[in-house]
Image (tube, rainbow, N blue to C red):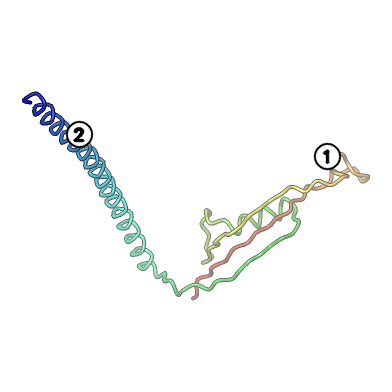
């Protein structure tokens, strides 16, 4: 009888130990999840502070959200390389310029057009090679500063 009582007592203690161990694992994962969330919140807080600084600098420069006019642009046509490079330069936000405008792109697609005559880059009848053409699809908004 004492042996049966000892076995039951041991099984109860073992079950309690297993439950405590599984609860400990769950609690450990929960702590790790909360620590990760805290790290993410700190990182986002730094980003918010950076954006607030940028907003203050823009306001100091006299830029405001209402100080812009938006002109939608949609171009779909064939262009020469010179025309295409000019279009890309105008729409480029990377090059500083004196004009107060900004291009907000939605879509830019450029495909080289190959014609039967120019497929092998052979010279045409006049002795000059045919100029390469490009099919361009450009869509976006030009935003112009209101004086």
Q: Nearer the viewer, mark 1 or mark 2?
A: 2
- Residues tagged 1 and 2 counted as in contact (Cβ below 8 A): no
Report the side of 12 relative to 36 (left or right).
left
Q: Residue 120: which quarter of the image? A: top right
Q: Residue 44 location in percent, x, y?
A: 32, 53
Q: Quadrant of the N terminus?
A: top left
Q: Residue 52: which quarter of the image? A: bottom left
Q: Residue 16 location in percent, x, y?
A: 15, 36
| Residue neighbourhood size for the residue with mark 2, other residues' Cα within 10 Å, grouped as few (<14), some (14–19), many (≥20) | few
Residue at the spot x=61%, y=59% of the render? 90
- Which element is circle 1 on? loop
Q: Residue 41 location in percent, x, y?
A: 28, 52
Q: Residue 4: which quarter of the image? A: top left
In the image, residue 60 sits, relative to residue 82, either above or below, namely below
Report the side of 114 relative to 51 (left or right).
right
Residue at the spot x=45%, y=75% of the render? 66
| Disc on res. 121 | 1
- Which element is circle 2 on? helix
**Counting residues from the N terminus, which is met first, the one under dot 1 or under dot 2?**
2
Q: Residue 33 location in percent, x, y?
A: 28, 45
Residue at the spot x=22%, y=40% of the render? 28
Looking at the image, which residue sits at the far right? 125
Looking at the image, which residue sits at the far left? 2
Between 9 and 81, the one lying in front of the other is 9
| Residue neighbourhood size for the residue with mark 1, other residues' Cα within 10 Å, grouped as few (<14), some (14–19), many (≥20) | some
In the image, residue 146 sits, relative to residue 116, either above or below, namely below
For the residues marked 1 and 2, what is the alpha-carbon distance in whole angstroms? 78 Å
Residue at the spot x=83%, y=39% of the render? 121
Report the side of 26 relative to 128 (left or right).
left
On the image, numbered disc 2 is attached to which residue? 18
Between 44 and 2, the one lying in front of the other is 2
Looking at the image, which residue sits at the far front? 1
């Amino acid at each position: 009888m004492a042996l049966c009582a000892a076995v039951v007592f041991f099984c109860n203690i073992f079950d309690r130990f297993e439950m405590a161990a599984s609860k400990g694992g769950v609690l450990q994962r929960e702590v790790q999840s909360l620590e990760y969330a805290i790290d993410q919140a700190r990182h986002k807080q730094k980003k918010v502070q950076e954006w607030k600084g940028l907003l203050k600098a823009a306001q100091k420069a006299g830029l405001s959200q209402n100080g812009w006019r938006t002109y939608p642009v949609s171009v779909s046509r064939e262009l020469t390389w010179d025309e295409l490079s000019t279009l890309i330069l105008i729409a480029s936000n990377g090059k500083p310029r004196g004009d107060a405008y900004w291009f907000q792109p939605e879509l830019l697609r450029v495909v080289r057009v190959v014609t039967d005559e120019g497929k092998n880059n052979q010279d045409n009848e006049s002795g000059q090679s045919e100029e390469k053409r490009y099919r361009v699809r450009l869509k976006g908004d030009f935003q112009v500063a209101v004086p």
